[in-house]
Image: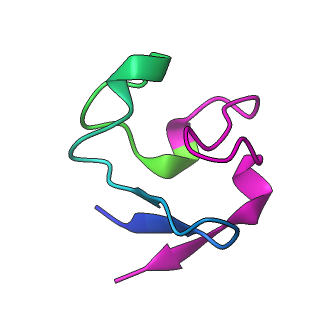
């Protein structure tokens, strides 16, 4: 699955890991994360993320 990079702080959302501390289970694709989810490091919205390798 595609990973996504926060362009503000460099956090990488990895679907294989998810974001369990914020209610996102492992195996959740970025597209399936609720729109109100924010970066766990800097707090910006999903619109500040870009696909990465």
Q: Residue at x 76, y 48 (%)?
A: 44
Q: Residue at x 48, y 65 (%)?
A: 4
Bounds of the magenta segment = 32-53
Q: Report the magenta stretch's main SS.
A: loop
Examine the rendered structure and indicate whether residue 24 appears above or below residue 23.
below
Residues 1 and 50: in front is 50
Picture quarter containing residue 14?
bottom left
Return the x and y of residue 46 as percentages of the image width and height: 71, 50
Q: Residue at x 21, y 46 (%)?
A: 16
Q: What is the total number of numbered labels drawn onto the structure image?
A: 0
Examine the rendered structure and indicate whether residue 38 appears above or below residue 22.
below
Q: Assign the C terminus to one quadrant of the image.
A: bottom left
Picture quarter containing residue 43?
top right
Q: In the displayed image of the protein, which residue is found farthest to the bottom?
A: 53
- Tell me, yes or no, whether the highlighted magenta stretch contains residue 33: yes
Examine the rendered structure and indicate whether residue 50 appears above or below residue 21.
below
Return the x and y of residue 13 as percentages of the image width and height: 42, 54
Picture quarter containing residue 3?
bottom left
């Amino acid at each position: 699955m595609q990973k996504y990079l926060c362009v503000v702080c460099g956090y990488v959302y990895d679907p294989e890991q998810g974001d369990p501390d914020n209610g996102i289970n492992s195996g959740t694709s970025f597209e399936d994360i609720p729109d109100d989810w924010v970066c766990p490091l800097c707090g910006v919205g999903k619109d500040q993320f870009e696909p990465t390798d």
